[in-house]
């Protein structure tokens, strides 16, 4: 009889413990932020171009699209964010992470961030809304003075002639210093790309010129400082990179790549015979074998410089020779919108058709 009583007591105890575990598990799930955006365990859904690639501190990969928002890949599944979930816009120009692990998105129309629970739009009026179970908070950026610190994140500011600076606490709008307007009809000093360099320098590429800022002084590069005739070969800058050697690479939509090494500036594309003899050096389509329309530039861990050309594929410069990769090498597109070196030194290529490649030696392997 005692054995039976002990057995019944044991069963009741196990049942009670199991019930408590289930209740505790349910409570934890309830406390977790609920995300209802679509997930896909197969492959990336995007069909528009991959404008940006980023690996965060946790090892997740973020892919920013040209028209469909952003996706994060944890190694198994994709989770998607779009303007329906609170992003300022679905075109993602760049992705960054701050010291607190918050992910920042520079979109076509504004700056948004995601802290794992909440999407915040930092460039709109002060409002709070609830959308798709996300708390979406908007904050207007402050007008600030030019400063620089090691923790800064820098962002394009749409059509404004300036940039946004996040100092670790707040987002500030900084207008560029007074400069000569070479073409008053167009707002040509809107930022197209940003690169951090040596000696505390950060470079801001705009359509019509480059502003370099080191925390106290500005360096300005434009048609006038270069001695260019705007009617013949105007600057139309789309990408910029200061490499590990301190050289500044400036990618143009029309006149190819300019290389600033110290005080000298050369047309790198022209020097390497990569400007077609009949080129109008503007936005016209270029034939294969040229490097005239450069929308992205990156450096790998061996010091090779990589260029994504709008019409003529991917180019690699090893310090001596140029090598070209196109559809004939297995790529699905000849236009790489983004090139990114991850924490392991591996190169990722985001193509204009939405495909993503990783470089394995000299072979491109499609990931998604």
Image (cartoon, rainbow, N blue to C red):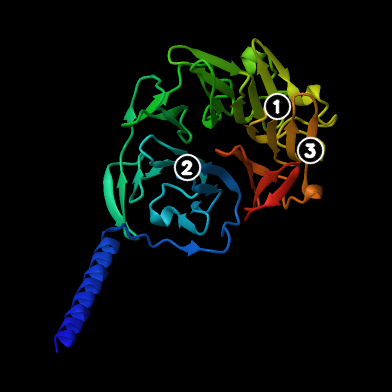
Q: Residue at x 66, y 17 (%)?
A: 260
Label 2 or label 3, whichever lies nearer to me, is 2
In percent of the image, x 34 and y 45: which residue is there? 120
Which residue occupies 52% across, 54% down? 75
Whole-Å distance between the Cαs marked 2 and 1? 30 Å
Q: Secondary structure at mark 3?
A: strand
> In the image, 282: left or right of 344?
right
Q: Secondary structure at mark 2?
A: loop
- The crowding category of the residue bearing disc 2, from other C-alpha atoms within 10 Å (few below 14, some 14 to 19, many at least 20), is some
Q: Check the picture and name the quadrant holding the N terminus.
A: bottom left
Query: Marks 2 and 3: CB-CB under 8 Å?
Result: no
Whether residue 230 is visible: no
Q: Would you name the residue on which mark 2 appears? A: 56
Q: Earlier in the sequence, mark 1 or mark 3?
A: 1
Q: Position of residue 348 (x, y in %)?
A: 62, 43
Name which quarter of the figure residue 302 lies in: top right
Residue 43 vs 226, above or below: the answer is below
User: Mark 1 Cα within 10 Å, few/some/many (few <14, many 20+)?
Assistant: many
Along the line of sight, which residue is nearer the eye, 256 or 95? 95
- Disc 3 marks which residue? 324
Nearer to us in this view, 180 or 317: 317
Quarter of image, res 123: top left
Q: Which residue is mark 1?
A: 257
46 shown above or below 51: below
Crowd class of label 3 (few under 14; some 14 to 19; many from 20; radius 10 Å): some
**Residue toward you, 317 or 60:** 60
Give the numbered dot on residue 244: none
Residue 86 in view in this figure: yes
x%, y% of residue 60? Answer: 49, 48
């Amino acid at each position: 009889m005692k054995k039976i009583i002990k057995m019944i007591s044991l069963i009741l105890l196990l049942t009670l413990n199991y019930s408590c575990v289930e209740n505790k598990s349910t409570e934890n799930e309830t406390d977790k932020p609920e995300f209802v955006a679509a997930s896909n365990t197969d492959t990336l859904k995007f069909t528009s171009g991959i404008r940006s690639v980023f690996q965060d501190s946790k090892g997740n990969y973020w892919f920013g699209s040209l028209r469909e928002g952003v996706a994060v890949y944890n190694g198994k599944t994709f989770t998607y964010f779009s303007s329906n979930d609170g992003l300022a816009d679905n075109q993602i120009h760049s992705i960054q992470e701050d010291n607190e692990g918050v992910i920042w998105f520079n979109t076509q129309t504004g700056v948004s961030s995601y802290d794992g629970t909440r999407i915040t739009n930092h460039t709109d009026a002060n409002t709070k809304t609830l959308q798709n179970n996300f708390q979406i908070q908007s904050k207007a950026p402050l007008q600030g003075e030019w400063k620089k610190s090691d923790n800064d994140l820098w962002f394009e500011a749409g059509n404004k002639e300036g940039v946004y600076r996040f100092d670790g606490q707040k987002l500030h709008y900084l207008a560029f210093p007074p400069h000569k307007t070479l073409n008053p009809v167009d707002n040509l000093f809107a930022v197209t790309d940003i690169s951090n360099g040596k000696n505390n320098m950060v470079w801001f590429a705009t359509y019509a010129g480059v502003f370099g800022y080191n925390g106290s002084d500005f360096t300005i590069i434009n048609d006038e400082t270069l001695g260019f005739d705007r009617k013949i070969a105007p600057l139309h800058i789309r990408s910029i990179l200061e490499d590990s050697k301190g050289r500044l690479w400036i990618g143009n939509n029309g006149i190819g790549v300019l290389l600033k090494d110290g005080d000298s500036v050369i047309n790198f594309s022209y020097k390497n015979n990569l400007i077609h003899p009949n080129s109008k050096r503007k936005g016209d389509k270029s034939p294969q074998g040229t490097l005239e329309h450069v929308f992205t530039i990156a450096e790998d861990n061996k010091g090779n410089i990589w260029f994504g050309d709008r019409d003529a594929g991917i180019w690699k410069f090893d310090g001596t020779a140029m090598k070209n990769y196109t559809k004939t090498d297995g790529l699905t597109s000849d236009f790489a919108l983004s090139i990114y070196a991850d924490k392991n030194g591996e190169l990722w290529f985001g193509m204009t058709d939405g495909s993503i490649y990783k470089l394995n030696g000299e072979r491109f392997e499609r990931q998604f």
